[in-house]
Amino acid sequence: MHTTDAVDALVSGNSLQDRHAWVTGAGKGLGQASAVALARLGACVHIISRTEDDLKKTADRIGEFGGTAEIVVCDVTDYEHLKSVFADAIVDVLVNSAGTNIPEPIADVSAGSYETIMGLNVKSTLFATQFAVSRMRQGGRGGSIVNLTSQMGHVGGPNRAVYCASKWAVEGMTKALALELAPEGIRVNTVSPTFVETPMTAGGLSNPDFQSWVLGEIPLGRLGRIDEVAAAVAFLASPMSSLTTGSSLLADGGWTAH
């Protein structure tokens, strides 16, 4: 994504005007918030999820301020369906937000839980990116890819062997792709949040002992907010970060500074 003045992009409020942004996992949580943030920057946002009702809620939020959203019902782990979604797409921005976690000790990890986590967190990210890059190349104006990972893509966590493996994998993938795609003006970065109260984390955070442990590990002393993560995504997706690629924006409250 090209710009003559990154400061202009910062203050203009429409730095993604006439651009097409695609967001996976856009029905809830961080994906929904990211889609709304990109629409606020002027992008036409294509929102992807398995659940149409969730996508309608996201589209309604975007419509409240006059933004544009296209609903795309797709299971991103379905390779052929995902490929068809991007077949003729205009893509300037891709946000890979779809993800999952099944916290369990190593003794309890099953082949099924491994396939579920790695399939959604890694495989779908790789192939959504592959299809999007093909369309970015066709468009010839570069682009920005933002992968939602986690602070657990930089450190370890108990009962999270597979989840950490998946997020470290995406961090490595991001750096490799940043080097490969930089000559074409396609930037690739990650946003790595700490614990944020979303539908995926709500169950664990409802346990007082677990929440106490989490808060004790965050130097700022609080959970992250969804809007804070969405702001980081919007920054990396837009020309505001035109010199940034191969990086991870750690929205972690200081967790990984230990």
Image: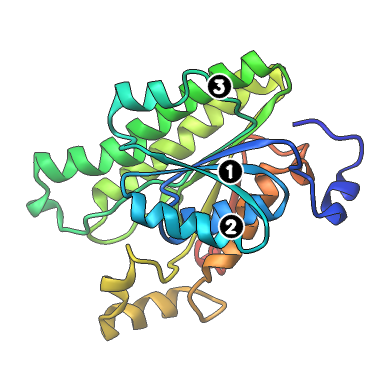
Q: Which residue is mark 2?
A: 62
Residue at left offset 33%, top offset 31%: 123
Going by the numbered disc 1, the residue's amino acid type is Val
Which-is-in-front pick, marks 3 and 1? 1
In the picture shown, does residue 55 fall above or below 206?
Answer: above
Its colouring scheme is rainbow
Going by the numbered disc 2, the residue's amino acid type is Ile
For the image, the number of numbered tags is 3
Relative image position of residue 64 (x, y in whole percent): 61, 63
Residue at left offset 85%, top offset 35%: 3
Do we see residue 34 in this rendering? yes
Q: Which residue is mark 3?
A: 133
In the picture shown, does residue 190 fall above or below 210?
Answer: above
Which-is-in-front pick, marks 3 and 2? 2
| Tag 2 secondary structure | helix
Asked if labels 2 and 3 touch by Cβ distance under 8 angstroms, the answer is no
| Tag 1 secondary structure | strand
Residue at left offset 34%, top offset 37%: 74
Residue at left offset 60%, top offset 65%: 228
Asked if labels 1 and 2 touch by Cβ distance under 8 angstroms, the answer is yes
Decide which of 46, 76 is in the foreground and name it. 46
Q: Which residue is mark 1?
A: 45
